[in-house]
Image (cartoon, grey):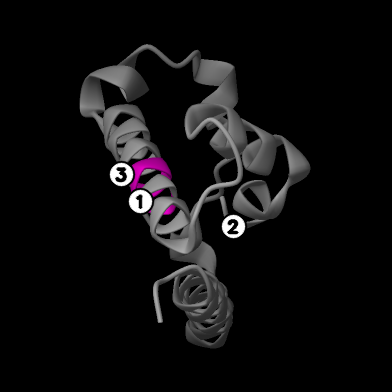
Amino acid sequence: MINYQKSQKYLSECSTMYNGNPSSRQNKVAAKVTFEISTMLLEELIDDSKFDQVAPQQHSNQSDTSSLSAEAKGKIRYIGGLCVAKTKYQYKLFTSSNSEP
């Protein structure tokens, strides 16, 4: 999402929405709206009824973690935590650079 909000397409859509170059406050509002919409879409995708409609062959890519060692599970948790932390940090930088002074 952060890459999208830095893209030329996003900036052009903001310019169209605000009939010209948006101010920093307008950019902040647009970023919040984009975040809220993406959150709503993710919540809808996570809804259990959506997962019931997925074809069984798509579930076959999931691996059984019960056979993994404790060290392997720890590495997966560590890498997952790094990904979440990096995403949160990038979002924090983006929102702070697009907020009003």
Residue 37 located left or right of residue 27 = left
Identity of the residue drawn at 39% across and 59% down: 25
Hey, which quadrant is residue 54 in on the image? top left
Hey, which quadrant is residue 76 in on the image? bottom right
Instruction: Identify the residue position indicated by label 1 in the image.
Output: 29
Identity of the residue drawn at 36% across and 38% down: 42
Query: Can you say whether 10 is above or below 32 in the image?
Result: above
Residue closer to the observer: 39 or 101: 101
Return the disc, 3 or 2, that comes first in the chain's sequence: 2
Instruction: Identify the residue position indicated by label 3 in the image.
Output: 36
Q: Residues within 10 Å of mark 2 (few under 14, many from 20)?
A: some
Q: Residues within 10 Å of mark 3 (few under 14, many from 20)?
A: few
Residue 54: which disc? none
Instruction: Identify the residue position indicated by label 2 in the image.
Output: 2
Magenta segment range?
31-35
**CA gap, disc 2 and disc 1:** 15 Å
Q: Nearer the viewer, mark 2 or mark 1?
A: 1
Residue 100 located left or right of residue 89 = left
Query: Can you say whether 15 is above or below 30 in the image?
Result: above
What amino acid type should be assigned to the residue bearing mark 2?
Ile
Q: Is residue 13 magenta?
A: no
